Amino acid sequence: MPMPAPAGLVGVTGSELSRRQWAIAFALVTSLFFTWITSKLWSQKGLLDVLNKHFQTVFGITKTQSTLLQLAYFGAYLVFSPFAGIFMRRYGYKKGIHLGLTLYSVGAVFFWPCAKYESSLAPSSSGCGLSTLEVAANSYISVLGSPKYAASRLNFSQGFQGIASFSGPLIASRWFFTGKNRTSLYTVQYVYLAVAGLGLVLNILFRFCHLPEITEEALSQEIHEIGIEGDIEPFWKQYRAIFGFVAQFTYVGAQVAVASFVVNYLTEHTFGHDYKDSVASNMFSYCQITFTVGRFVGVVILNFVDPALLLSCYGTLCTVFCLGVALAPGKGGIACLYCLFFFESICYPVIFTLGTKNLGVHTKRGSSLIVMGVSGGAWYPAAQGALADRSTSHRSYLVPMTGYIVMTSYAIGMCISQAVQGGFRIRNVHEPAINKELKVEDAEAKTNQKEQADEYVEKDTMSH
């Protein structure tokens, strides 16, 4: 049964907002992407990947054991995302953002004693907070306007996280891998305390921002008006969302695994690589810059090319270049690594928008399911670490390749589904307009059939 709109909130859709309202709402959520993802990537994703190598040195642990960092952080997405979706269905997007920022700040504070006493890292609270923020912001940007440009909008908003992603490894190369910091976590603790303070400030500032509430009921009514009634079916029959979860799970797992072992990949003597940790961390930052450039390039391309088709092409290239990273020696493997980061760039936002498109009353539940897919980052690094311990870091890149294969299969399946419903397409199209045309054509066809039937009956009557 659909959950009623949150009490006291007037439900709208993105198309009902004025240009000024739309611009303000888009800027607010996009700025939130930049500010919270800056803290997220400095303290979790960007630094987490380079800290894997650092913790191996500090704690004297294996590559597989160091991936428990990813397990604790990304595992929280699997557990908490459904609760985030339920919370936002009842209380709305804005309160969901407040909840996410609060949990994230608490998690960042918890890291301080762990770093100070060099005991363990427990980032699960931050993961719960960030999973809530991902459900809220990704979903809000996706429905804030025409479905035609949903993938392009989300790519643009998430593009700002790339600016933060390459700063994480640069900080690590300067502060974590040099001098006495090479064997301690002294400087790491202050990054987390600063992030906690930033989260608190954002929470307070966001309290005074007006954010129009886009409700599932309004979205459902909008798609029903153009003849799309898929949300009448129960949620377990929303196959694009369910398979979207599988694609997101395998893609994020592959992406996190690839990033987690870049420093190990570049510092191993095998395959002609022998860089210092600080140099490898800088090179990883350049990989993230490549990723960021690819994301903004993707914004332009997605305005013209069908998202499912583009994801199919990018997924295929990710598979090919990941295989190259695993097998090509020397600079050839490094070149494949940079190409892999470039073609990863659009995958997450496009999977999200494809999986949540036209869900109507299931929009927030579907968004939480897709965000649950981020938990793939908890399992793939462990599998890759196990192979790296038994073989080499280079060969271990065969593990994330399997994730790209599954993601590409989902994209190709979406292309086939679209071709069956409305014909194969290369260009990005405005689906509501097409559905209206099909609805008119269907109505005209039914009218013609009725007129022909009446004419036949009339002739038959006259003949008797």
Image (cartoon, rainbow, N blue to C red):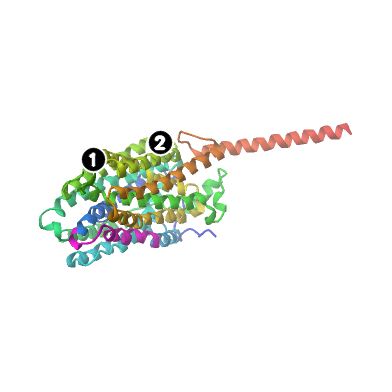
Q: Is residue 437 left or right of residue 405?
A: right
Which region is colored magenta?
A: 57-79
Residue 393 on image: x %, y %: 27, 50
Residue 10 on image: x %, y %: 46, 54
Residue placed at 14% from the left, 50% from the top? 174
Residue 339 appearing in the image? yes
Foreground: 158 or 27? 158
Residue 426 on image: x %, y %: 46, 33
- Crowding near the residue tagged with mark 2, few <14, some 14–19, many ≥20 C-alpha atoms within 10 Å: some
**What kind of element bears circle 2?**
loop
- Crowding near the residue tagged with mark 1, few <14, some 14–19, many ≥20 C-alpha atoms within 10 Å: some
Residue 144 appearing in the image? no
Badge 1 vs badge 2, beta-carbon distance below 8 Å: no
Q: Quadrant of the C terminus?
A: top right
Foreground: 427 or 445? 427
Amino acid carrying mark 1 in the image:
Gly
Residue positioned most to the right: 464
**Is 136 drawn above or below residue 435 in the view shown?**
below
**What kind of element bears circle 1?**
helix
Q: Is residue 74 magenta?
A: yes
Q: Please name the residue that numbered disc 1 is placed on.
A: 330
Q: Please name the residue that numbered disc 2 is placed on.
A: 303
Q: Main secondary structure of the magenta part?
A: helix
**Is 60 drawn above or below residue 442 in the view shown?**
below
Q: Earlier in the sequence, mark 1 or mark 2?
A: 2
Q: Is residue 162 left or right of residue 147?
A: left
Residue placed at 42% from the left, 58% from the top? 92
Foreground: 130 or 221? 130
* Quarter assignment of residue 307: top left
